[in-house]
Amino acid sequence: MKAQELCMALVHADSPEEVVSILQKAGYWDDPKVWRDLGDNENNYSVIGAQQSDPIAALVEKVVNSIDARLMNECISRGIDPTSKQAPTSVRRAIASLIEGSDPDKAANGRIEHWVRKQRREQAEYISISATGSKSNPCLSISDLGEGQTPAAVPDTFMSLAKSNKLRIPFVQGKFNMGGTGALRFCGGLHHFQLVLTRRNPALLPDGADNPWSFTIVRRMEPTDGERSSVYRYLAPIPTGDEKKPMLLTFNVESLPIRPKGNNAYALQQEYGAFIKLYHYEYTYRSHVLLSDGLLRQIDTRLPSPALPYMMHECRAYKGDSDRSFANPATGVLVRLADDKGDNLEQDFPKHDEMVVAGQRFRISLFGFKAKKAATYLNRSEGVLFVVNGQTHGTLSPQIFTRSKVGLDYVADSLMVSLDCSELSRTALEELFMNSREALAKSEFRTAVERELEDVLNHHPLLREFNNRRREEKIKEKAEDNSSMEDTLKEILSSSPSLASIFLSGQKLKTPFNIKQSAASDKFDGKLFPSYFRFRGRAQDEELSRKAEKGRAIRLSFETDVEDNYFGRSKEPGSYTVEQELDGAWVAVTQRSMNLYRGNATLTITLEGDEPVGKQVPLRFTVSDDQMLEPLVSSARIELIPYQDHDTSDTKKHKKKNPKNDGNDTTDQAGIELPTATWISKEEWDDYGFNEHSVLRVLRADTGGDKAKFDFFLNQDNIHLLNELKHAKGKEDLVREQYRVGMLLLGMSVIHGLGKNADGDVVRERADQVTSAAALVLIPMIRHLGKLDLLLKPKLAEAA
């Protein structure tokens, strides 16, 4: 079988079984001499197996490598050495200068969110992902019109492990140089096949240079005698002077039909670049790639803002009446939201801010979704995306929003946060992320970033308003008279000293809403650039003097007339610096964050150094942008006072001393406010994650303080409650009230046991477990335990 014939047979194969048959027919399958160790490392299985644990993250690496190849192609074709000082210094600057032909010094350039749809479509055609084969076991092919590689370069690029061929190129992302091998373990079947086909762009070679296509296929080979683990090897049947380094098969032809169009995977000719095929790629939700649960949406959060767009093609046997049914440009979830924010995001979103941790700057983007819109864009496991040059390198689950230090329970499933980490130093990136670029590392820096993010989320006025508004929507429209429940609970608490010591007996139920509605007069119309940015209630040049506790974060309030996204926008953004006078010199404050909302800004900082109590610490705050003739400067003087313990924990604050000193100190709990209770019908189950066995969902309604506040939602169509009501015979109201009060007490007991500062998800899960288990026995237990004294009287009399 000739090389080109073998190559095209492998291109069109859509199952591992076909690949084996083709290689057997060519005489290569059983010949160990024609298979070369990937990375020239016989222990490569441990290296490759330790990469991405998620198939989508591994696939994204392939797309990122294709984007890198495109930028390399554009750079070299212009006669620029990618490692030289003349090369672009970042991905964004490379897009601006090499793709757009625009000024890279302007922050808005080099960002595809500012491109018109036609430009995105045209650029997307250079890179494509196509799905072929069966609907249940698809093959995925990635093709690009990038630089391509010569046959001699393939072992050091596509087939390399941990070589440094991109390390000194600042505008590419694949610096760990694993060749995208993380995808191998997710290729289906025993052998994990991956096809690689490539040709160098002729424009990058000297005139007349030989430039054939080369190809190989990677397979996993089971361990033989003396081998402890499997080995990944690739087809290299051409002998060389080194028997351990044979070369790839090659053939000469100007172009090959390997690029997709519509639902035809091999419709267009390709003259150079790369083509990679992953056979029976094992990822979840293998439906039509363009559907809401398809591959495109799964990639979207892993590549939320790609440096360049790419095409997605569905080439399996699905029905459709136009090319749009089978092919669409992919631009990432952040770009899609920017395009469609009016239909999907709440008012004032997206919101862009920044925070600085250990001198490293993060750009924060907040996305608050309208009810039931988030599912179109988000995976349930991803609440915070840590993004570098458009690629997600790590995530935090939405549970961060329900942490007690954040307290955004009502919008936890409608909120997404993106942290752009592209400006972090290489050292900071290494401290924050694992080398697999799919997970956060466990480090002190990562912990510091999480703590600062918690503080930003907790104190952000837009998020607090969003959470309160969503709470009002869930409760106020369905508010019912809680007076009977309140009276019942008061009676129970007053008659039980043990319960009264835990809960706040006799407390008046308060309205569950503390929302300042934005009336028309409250509407803020910010300017594009500020005319002032000053401490609240002071003139621009008036110094602020205040006290602050040593060792505690300091919050400073400002007022301005500029729009909310002034510091975070990509077009003509503003910037600010915070400096502290330390040892006679001005130094930058390296731990700070700023939120700006409707003309009010809150700056949170941690002072540098270890200044003593009583010291007057000068601060200087400077705001500037490209339009200002002179920056806006504000000065402050902070007097340090001793650190005070503000611990409001129940045990510490309410502990009563025992004058007899007999070891029997008592604790007067600050308690839990009586919750609101709202019945939920079967039609609303999806909104609360209920099923027929669910009883109670608890949502935190505050962010701490002396009195914990929670809202309770009860399933009125619980199967055990319905069974009891069926046999109640005229006592339905009594049974419902017994059920409600009993479950409320159980829920409050769970909160007390965990502590009022427990994270919302922990409270919710425990309350669900306890009340669901109790639902079967609660009503019978209440009914029969009340008769227990009558049952025991004869036995007690007999015993007497």
Image (cartoon, helix red, strand yellow):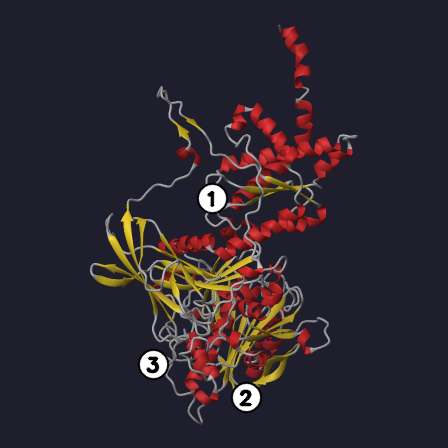
Amino acid type of the residue tagged 2 in the rendering: Val
Residue identified by numbered label 1 = 704
Q: Decide: is 140 above or below 689.
A: below
Instruction: Find residue 544 and report its image quarter.
Output: bottom left
Query: Badge 3 local density, few (<14 within 10 Å), some, or many (20+)?
Result: few
Observer-nearest of 786 and 171: 786
Residue at x 43%, y 67% (from the top left corner)? 567
**Nearer the camera: disc 1 or disc 2:** 1
Mark closer to the observer (3, 1)? 1
Which residue appears farthest toward the left when viewing the image?
584
Q: Which SS class for mark 2?
A: loop
- The x, y position of residue 331, in whole percent, is 55, 72
Badge 2, how many Cα within 10 Å: few under 14, some, many 20+? Answer: few
Q: CA distance from mark 2 to mark 3?
A: 33 Å
Mark 1–mark 2 Cα distance, whole angstroms, equals: 70 Å
Gap in angstroms between the C-alphas marked 3 and 1: 54 Å
Name the residue tied to disc 2.
253
Whether label 3 touches label 1, CB < 8 Å? no
What residue is drawn where x is 33% and y is 55%?
606
Q: Position of residue 789 (x, y in %)?
A: 66, 16
Looking at the picture, tell me which residue is in the foreground, 15 or 726. 726
Decide if residue 622 is on the left or right side of residue 297: left
Q: Residues within 10 Å of mark 1 (few under 14, many from 20)?
A: some
* Sequence-earlier tag: 3 or 1: 3
Q: Name which residue type carries label 3.
A: Ser
Label annotation for residue 14: none
Place residue 764 in its image quadrant.
Answer: top right
Give the numbered dot on residue 84.
3
Residue 2 shows in the view: no
Relative placement, left or right, of 748 versus 609 is right
